[in-house]
Image: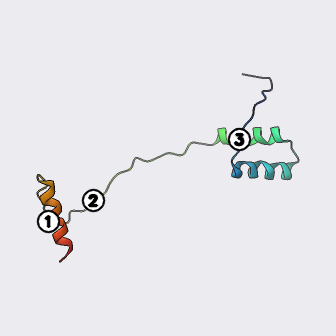
Amino acid sequence: MYAGCMRTTVDLDDDVAAAIAQLRRGGSVGLSEAVNQLIRAGLLQTPRVHHRFRQRSTPLGLRIDVSNVAEALETLDGAGGR
């Protein structure tokens, strides 16, 4: 584990900078300590489980031969005008 200090330049998004400012106001801590606290809190978060997307469909009873795409599009265009 790295025990020393590391200096670097970081560009913070506005919402992150606001969270740091809020933490500093509420706890009277320095900038580095506030950044470290927020990073540690984020690292301790349990990752959210992402469920696989599943497309659900319902049969509409419409049957179109799509072997000829141009003809299928023409049929669909004509069906919308009825």
Of the 4 image quadrants, the one containing the N terminus is top right
Look at mark 3 in the image and give the residue it sits on. Answer: 11
Q: Is residue 62 visible?
A: no
- Identify the residue position indicated by label 1 in the image: 75
| Count of marks overlaid on the render | 3
Query: Which label sits in the foreground, 2 or 1?
Result: 1
Q: How many other residues sit within 10 Å of disc 3, few (<14), some (14-19) or many (≥20)?
A: few
Name the secondary structure under disc 1.
helix
Residue at the bottom extreme, as displayed:
82
Q: Earlier in the sequence, mark 3 or mark 1?
A: 3
How much space separates mark 2 and mark 3, taking CA atoms? 45 Å
* Identity of the residue furthest to the right in this view: 28
57 above or below 12? below
Q: Name the kind of residue labelled 3 in the image.
A: Asp
Residue corresponding to mark 2: 57
| Image coords of residue 41 (percent x, y) | 70, 42
